[in-house]
Amino acid sequence: PCVPVDYLTIMDALAIASDHDEITTHDASNLNPRVMEQRRSIRILLRPGDYYMKEAIVVQAVGQNTSLSIETMDIPSRNTPSLVTEETSSSSTTDELEALPAPAAQSNKFPAQGFIKRARSFRKKLSCRNMDAVQDSNSSESEDEEQSSKTPVRATLISKFRAHNEPALWVRQGTLQLKNIAVNHNCNGIDIWNGNAAIQIQPSSGPDENPLPTRPKAYLQQVDVTSRSGRGIVNIDGGTCSISRCYVHDCAATGIYVGGPGSRATIEETDVIRNGGGNNQRRGIAPGHSGIYLEQGCAVVRNCNISQNSLTGISAVSQQNAILDMEATDLIANGAMQLEMPPTGSESHTRSSTQNNNMAETGSLRNRSGMVVE
């Protein structure tokens, strides 16, 4: 489905793949204790623009190879309509759309008639350029450039949570795929160990408070990630994360955190910059965090830019189980040091590999993702 064409909100679209009976989990932190399971794979297309979120998107995908995909739809820039329905005022945007009530019928198969009219009007706007637009050849190049500069290039998920220490997206089971999406996270609380992150890949805990063996996975491609209240991407307790051509920046705490036995992260052509500077919130996050922090697990870093972070560029911590494979990566102008490795002779150091990297206290940055705004 397309949002806001077929459904007004992401949660409405996600519901068509979900079991409407909520399930109870047993997380020690009580983070999102009740969620809906996704019973089949679903691909959600978002029109470019801002989407204000009032609750986390939780991926609890059951069944073999069940996945959730969220990506920005490809729309020609000159034909991109405003995020305004015909039945709302001209000042209404997607943040107001998220607050609108669901269709009166509350049925995913048969939405209310008024919503059908809005969907048809959006489809008309999203269709190929009409003949009037083709015949309008008198627009100047400067007008085209001005319009292009104002047109959003991707969908941006903006968290506005009242809950404490809640991620914008939490992958508990199954697979999440994000493509050409921005995640702008901010929540109450300072507990970066229990959910205060933009994207969290972590299985649920059982009654004994141990992680369940669900092995969640996340594939991020061309994703812009920032968190004003915590970490950027957290992959722990046996999760798997692939980060390709992404931009992880200006997080209050660590940019990318990997921890727990069996956790794996592959980071390629990605910029991880200006993270760990803390925030200005009262009793907030203090400065002094790394770009990438590998507590336990395995991390592969290829052709990345890890620079200008508050503490270190990359820290690999565990002497027995922090395996780093890094190649063709720049670590420049990070705070305390560029690269922190386990002691020489430790198992982690012996199994790790670093080659053809550029490490310097000063120097110009070569961005990799193509998403960095100078």
Image: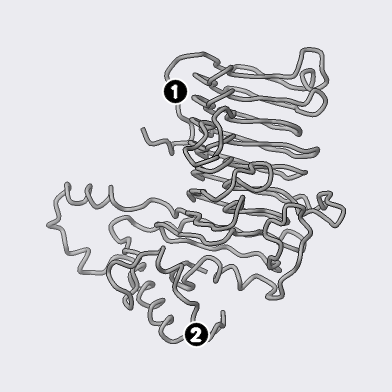
Where is residue 207 shown, x and y percent of the image?
A: 85, 57
**First in sequence: mark 2 vs mark 1:** 2
Distance of label 2 from label 1 (alpha carbons): 53 Å
Indicate the position of residue 84 as horizontal and vertical percent values: 33, 68
Q: Residue 88, percent across and down?
A: 33, 75
**Measured along the vertical axis of the image, is residue 215 above or below residue 4?**
above
Please, what secondary structure does the residue beneath circle 2 have?
loop
Q: Residue at x 65, y 36 (%)?
A: 257
Q: Nearer the viewer, residue 307 or 288?
A: 288
**Which quadrant does the C terminus fall into?**
top left
User: Going 62% across and 25% down the picture, which residue do you hit?
Assistant: 314
Residue linked to disc 2: 104
Discs 2, 1 touching: Cβ within 8 Å: no
Closest to the camera, between mark 2 and mark 1, is: 2
Q: Which residue is mark 1?
A: 365
The three-letter amino acid code for the residue at tag 2 is: Ala
Q: Which mark is residue 80?
A: none
Residue 299's place in the image compared with 241, above or below, is above
Task: Answer above or below: position of 55 versus 116.
Answer: above
Depth check, front residue: 7 or 165? 165
Please tell me how crowded label 2 is: few (under 14), some (14-19), or many (20+) other residues with Cα within 10 Å. Answer: few
Q: Would you identify the image quadrant in which residue 306 lies?
A: top right
Crowd band around label 1 with a 10 angstrom C-alpha radius: few (<14), some (14–19), many (20+): some
In the picture provided, is 194 more to the left or to the right than 277?
right
SS category of the residue bearing label 1: loop
Residue occupying the far left of the picture: 138
The residue drawn where x is 75% and y is 68% is 23
* Residue drawn at 59 percent across, 47 percent down: 189
- Give the farthest residue toward the front: 282
Residue 120 percent location from the top left of the image: 39, 78
